[in-house]
Amino acid sequence: MVSRSVSSAPAASASASKPRPDADETLRLVLTRLDDMKAEDTTTIDLRDKSTIADTMVIASGRSSRHVGSIADRVIEDLHKAGLRARVEGMPHCDWVLIDAGDVVVHVFRPEVRSFYALEKMWAGRDTGTRRAS
């Protein structure tokens, strides 16, 4: 997998004074963009009591590699505009793109790849920390 980092260096002085979004704002931003881009089967998993890697994991599907790439590009663009750094892996092939925005980790899959890795089963377990977005 190829990794790229999206810089959060401010382009103008107005963005320099903008406060960094908290975990809840970041999650809202991600979920809004996923919905706007017609991502399918979006699931959020609360990780606060399970891991220190992030507060929330978001898993979504795109219909094709092109759709997965477009979804990921737009999420990354919005995170950048909000002043967040994001580490990204998987963009060249777009079977599975991982976007690490610190408090929120986003996985965008093609459906068959998502089914193969079954992250929801691994992370959600039997608790109520998982919820499907409508």
Image (spheres, helix red, strand yellow):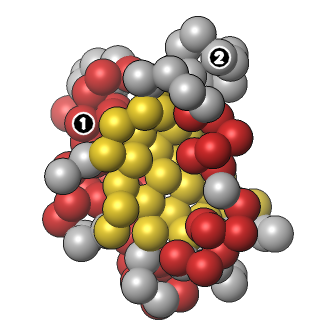
Q: Amino acid at mark 1?
A: Arg
At mark 2, the secondary structure is loop
Vertical position of residue 13 compared to residue 77: above or below: above
The N terminus lies in quadrant: bottom right
Vertical position of residue 61 compared to residue 12: above or below: below
Residue with the mark numbered 1: 28
At mark 1, the secondary structure is helix
Q: Give residue 116's mark.
A: none
Identify the residue shown where x is 65% and y is 17%. Answer: 50
Vertical position of residue 10 compared to residue 33: above or below: above
Q: Is residue 55 left or right of residue 81?
A: right
Q: Position of residue 56 (x, y in %)?
A: 48, 29
Q: Position of residue 72 (x, y in %)?
A: 45, 66
Residue with the mark numbered 2: 50
Identify the residue shown where x is 24% and y is 72%. Answer: 38
Asked if labels 2 and 1 touch by Cβ distance under 8 angstroms, the answer is no
Vertical position of residue 18 compared to residue 69: above or below: above
Residue 70 is at least partly visible in this image: yes
Residue 11 is at least partly visible in this image: no
Residue 3 lies in quadrant: bottom right
Q: Residue furthest front?
A: 126
Identify the residue shown where x is 60% and y is 67%. Answer: 114
Q: 67 or 7, which is in the foreground? A: 67
Q: Amino acid at mark 2?
A: Lys
Q: Position of residue 80 (x, y in %)?
A: 40, 48
Q: How many marks?
A: 2
Residue 24 lies in quadrant: top left
